[in-house]
């Protein structure tokens, strides 16, 4: 398939930290027809660089990167755009797009608010 979605998590050297992301990724792969991949910005494999190179080798033409971050802090304002820029130079035939972080999506805010309300005993 020409289009792929990459979920981008921060990364950690602690394998326990990665488990929820890997579980989420596995669940999404079962639910969606779109090819979904998990990559890490740093400290973990597969890195964004490794993932993009593998996707290009598989014939991908368009890759969108969806950050699993609450907000666009320094990493999403500087570091990740720098990675995307470098990857675009390395893989000029691949259209790479950085999407806004999931935390900025209204549906994410609603889902998180529902979880917090339930924890606070306010579930309706």
Image (spheres, rainbow, N blue to C red):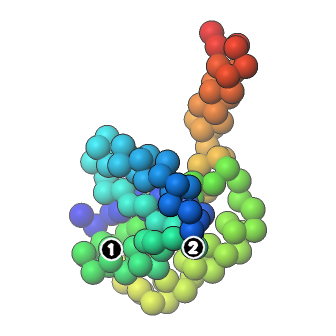
Residue receiving disc 1: 55
Seen as rendered, the residue at the extreme top is 124
Position of 45 relative to 101 (above/below): below
Counting from the top left corner in percent of width and height, residue 44 is at: 51, 70
- Counting residues from the N terminus, which is met first, the one under dot 2 or under dot 1? 2
Residue displayed at 27% across by 81% down = 57
Mark 1 residue element: helix
Q: Quadrant of residue 98?
A: bottom right
Residue displayed at 37% across by 81% down = 53
Position of 27 relative to 55 (above/below): above
Disc number for residue 91: none
Q: How many marks?
A: 2
Counting from the top left corner in percent of width and height, residue 54 is at: 32, 77
Residue 124 visible, this angle: yes
Mark 2 residue element: loop
Residue 65 visible, this angle: no
The CA span between labels 2 and 1 is 20 Å
Q: Residues within 10 Å of mark 1 (few under 14, many from 20)?
A: many
Q: Residues within 10 Å of mark 2 (few under 14, many from 20)?
A: few
Residue displayed at 43% across by 61% down = 38
Disc number for residue 43: 2
Seen as rendered, the residue at the extreme bottom is 90
């Amino acid at each position: 398939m020409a289009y792929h979605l990459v979920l981008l998590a921060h990364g950690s050297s602690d394998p326990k930290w990665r488990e929820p992301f890997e579980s989420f990724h596995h669940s999404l792969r079962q639910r969606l027809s779109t090819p979904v991949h998990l990559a890490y910005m740093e400290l973990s494999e597969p890195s964004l660089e490794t993932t993009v190179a593998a996707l290009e080798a598989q014939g991908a033409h368009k890759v969108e990167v969806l950050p699993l971050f609450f907000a666009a802090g320094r990493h999403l304002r500087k570091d990740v755009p720098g990675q995307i820029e470098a990857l675009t130079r390395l893989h000029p035939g691949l259209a790479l797009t950085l999407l806004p972080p999931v935390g900025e999506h209204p549906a994410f805010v609603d889902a998180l608010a529902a979880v917090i309300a339930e924890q606070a005993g306010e579930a309706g």
